[in-house]
Every structure is written in C-alpha cells, then in structure tokens.
Amino acid sequence: MMDSPRHPFLHGLSKHRGAPPTVVVIFGASGDLTARKLIPAVYNLAHDNLLPADFHLVGFGRKAIPDDEFRGLAAGAIREFSRRELDAGVWERVAARTTYVAGGYDERAAFDRLAAHIAAIERGLGRDLQCLFYISTPPSVFAPILTHLGASGLAARHVHGPLHSKVVIEKPFGRDLVSARGLNRVIGSVFEERQVYRIDHYLGKETVQDLLVQRFANAIFEPLWNRNYIDSVQITVAEDAGVAGRGGYYEQSGALRDMIQNHTMQLLALTAMEPPGSLDPEAIRDEKVKVLNAIQPLGTGPDGDVARAQYAAGMIGGGPVRGYLEEEGIEAGSATETYAALRLSINNWRWQGVPFYLRSGKRLARRVSEIAVNFRRPPGTLFAGETARFDLSGNTLSFQLQPDEGLSMILNTKVPGLETRTQPVKMSFRYATTFGSNTAEAYERLVLDAIVGDGTLFIRGDEAEASWRLYTPVLDAWAGAGRAGMDTYSAGSWGPLGAEALLARHSHVWRQP
Ligand code: BG6
C-alpha cells in the first residue's frame, strides 16, 4: 500500500496503531458474504499488520459448527476468495483466536452464551475488548439480532468509553421508506448513532474515495463543477453477470433496490455534494444528506424520469445465456427489473437544470462502473462547420471505478500535420500503472474503519431515509403496474430502447463506457 502524507484518506491506514483491542462477532458466519468478503478482509488486514494486537474473531450462526471446523471453513474461504494466497503463518495467528458460537438469532439464551463467551476471552487475555458486531444475515433477522444485543447488555458495553460496542449492518437497509425508518428505530432503541456503521461497499472502493480528493484537492475542477460548465452527469454501474444462484434474493429486490437506491446514490452524493467544512465524518455526511434531499421527485408516467427492463436471452463472452425469466428461482411472469435507468434533477443553486442520469443492470455488455461528467461545449465560433476537418467532442471527465480503476478526460486536440484538423483524444491515469495493482478490497477498508471508529465511509440513518424517500414512490408505481411498461433487452447489449429514449427526450445519449 502506498503511503503519502498528502493523501487525506491514507490517514486511515495509520489509524490502526490506535485501534482498540477488539473482538469481531460475525452474525451469519456460514453465509456467502462471510466467505467471499469478510473472512478474506480480516485475513488481508492481518497480513498487512493492520489488526489490533489483541484481535479475536467469533462466528455466530444457527448451525452447530465446532471451532475447528469453522477455522477450516474460514481457511477454505481465504484460499478461494482472498486476493492473496493463504500464508500459513499469518492465518495461524488469526486462527488461534477464531471461535464459533451456535445459536438462533431469535433466541435470547444464545446471546447470553455469546456474552459469556466474550467474557471468557477477556478473562483469558486479562483485559477488556471492544465488541464489533457485524450483522451479515438475511434482513428478516436484523431486528431480532439488534433487540437481543440490547437485551443481553452487549450493545451497551463500555458505552461511554473508547471500548464501546459497535454494530455494522449489511445491506439491504430496508426495502422502502417505511421499513428503513422502522429499522432505524430498532437500531436507535439499542445503539447510539455513533455506534452504527451501515455498509455500502461502494464507498470502500478506491476510486470512490479518490473522487473527493480529485474534487477538493485540485484547483482546476471545483470552479467548473456547476450548472454553468457542466451539461450532464452519467453514472453507470453495469454488470455482465446475471442472477444465477441468487434468484430468490433478486426476485425480492430488483435493480432499483439492489444497486440504484444505495450504490449509485452514494456515487451521486459524493459527485454532487457541496464541499464539506472538514473531513470529519459528520461534515461529509451532512453534505451528502443535503444534496440527496434536494433531488426532485421522479416522474413515473410514460414520458417520465425512469425506465426499467428485464434481460432476455442473448450472448455474453461469446456464449449463449438465458433470459431472466428462464433463470432458476424466478417466478413465471416476474415483474422484477434487472435494469433501471433514471433522470434525476437536483434543485439547488449549483445543479439546477443539470440532469444526473443513473443506470444499472445485470447481463449488460461488460462489467464497468463509472461516473462521467460531461462539460458544456465552448462557443462554436472558431472550429465550426467543416465537420470533416473539425471532429470535436464535449469534454468528459470520467472516474472509472472498475475494472481498471482510473480517471480519464476527453480533450479536443489538433491532429499533427500542416492542415488544421481536430480530433478528440483521451488522457488517462490508471491506478495500477502509477501505484501498482495490489490495492486493498473495499471490505478491508471498511472493516478496518469500523474497528477504528471512522464512520466517513458508512451511511448515516438519515441518508438511507433520504434515498428511500425518493425511490419508494417509483417502487410503488412499478408494483402497481406489474409488467406493464417493462422493457426487455438482449443479454450482452447495453440495455433497453426505453433507456435510450429517456435520454433522447432531453437531447442526450448514453456514453459508451
Ligand atoms: C451488491 C449487489 O451489492 O453489489 C449485487 O447485491 C452486485 O447484485 C454487487 O452484483 C456488485 O458489487 P461489485 O463490487 O462487484 O461491483
């Protein structure tokens, strides 16, 4: 990992020196996310010596699993999913402090057993530990887990001191405004907001954090970052993967809930917010909430601000793939969208009249996520007419989140030669080229931040509600319409015609990422 004192976010990596002794308890310990992301994140933090010296890991789940077997599962997860090979020495150190507690999420006695288990670890160590409760279960048991953490006294441990308990809550954070508010109420009855870390793993991505540095540590962007110079912004989170193996979950979710309401809205908030007064987590989150609250309600009628679609059979990577309705676990005649596109209007001084277009979908042409800021064109007095000679494009600044993280800018340039001809060119910066490619994964960053108590890259309760306030009427309209108005697109394409039409109505076209 690079270390430069001038990069504000790299501060985070030295904070571990002050990280309190910690026990991380993972609820949902035998789940998919634990294996794919959480265990590898803990392992890589251990590898980089970023964990506190006194660090314990406790898996909690319904299945009775002996400690040894849990350690074996964890080692298997590292072998399969970690960005680094398993180093036996590193893993031995973590494994020696990894245990498992079996119990029901709705079983009060199980939480008493967990409390006794933690107390026994502390007795063995001869010191108290901070508890970090990581809730990585299906959302149906979020509330019982939170309630039992309260009733068992685990939530309130050391509440006034540096070893106060913390809770990390995985997505989905509610499925509409009412449920998100309800969840916030349950959380608030047990934890203080400063103890709560709502995850959006997109905030852990390197380019997303760099967005703030680019915007506020360079003099050239911010003066132009407004309606006078920016024509439109496009945020794309495209995946080539389908929903294989997750049909049950996805049927209850869809693209708007799964990707737009959370991930793309965080990207929008960081792109559009006002400069915060400091890098203090609350200062940043206050600005994000303000800009989210300035977004106008979305029109859901035929010529409105939203488009949705499902993928039909097509080709991905040279091979045929099934349509959404043919995937396993999908109901016949399902009205779940696998693609959503939207036009958002932010009604504030900076952005009035600048459309923010968002799109996300499964089974698109390729996996790519980017934020593209399109600038207005200069007056066309000089290099005008004669389109054969003067090939000109608007300037676009794009942040590529994945793959191949980087930043690029489209500029118009003179083609070398005696005749004046112009051509757009792309100026690119790639993290991997400049800094090397072994960057930490989003979850490593986020787990470490939660351990050290930095909430900057987590979502505050009011942020989650602001986003749901915008999208709940859209979800209600879609639920009411069933399949009426549902477009389709071929797997492997860039999405449905309805999404093209959404932009065409405002004289824009989607950028080809
Ligand atoms: C998750 C969604 O939040 O993000 C998935 O539930 C999606 O459907 C995933 O595939 C994408 O994350 P990433 O980091 O691979 O872009």
Image (cartoon, rainbow, N blue to C red):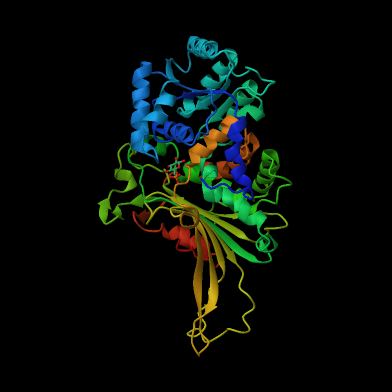
Q: How many labels does the image show?
A: 0
Residue 506 in sight here: no
Up the image or down, 472 lies above or below 355; here it is: above
Residue shown at 63% from the left, 83% from the top: 381
Up the image or down, 314 lies above or below 463; here it is: below
Up the image or down, 279 lies above or below 158; here it is: below
Relative placement, left or right, of 299 versus 510 is right
- Residue 32, position as x, y percentages in the image: 39, 32
Relative placement, left or right, of 30 versus 357 is left
Residue 88 in sight here: yes
Residue shown at 54% from the left, 30% from the top: 169
- Residue 292, position as x, y percentages in the image: 64, 46
Residue shown at 46% from the left, 27% from the top: 137
- Residue 415, position as x, y percentages in the image: 49, 81
Toward which corner of the image does residue 329 lie, by quadrant?
top left
Given residues 318 and 407, the one toward you in this image is: 407
- Residue 249, position as x, y percentages in the image: 40, 35
Residue furthest out toward the front: 89
Given residues 77 and 412, the one toward you in this image is: 77
Toward which corner of the image does residue 22 lie, by quadrant?
top right
Given residues 319 and 87, the one toward you in this image is: 87
- The quadrant of the rendered image in which ligand 1 is seen is top left
Residue shown at 34% from the left, 39% from the top: 330
Q: Which quadrant is home to the C terminus?
A: bottom left
Residue furthest out toward the left: 319
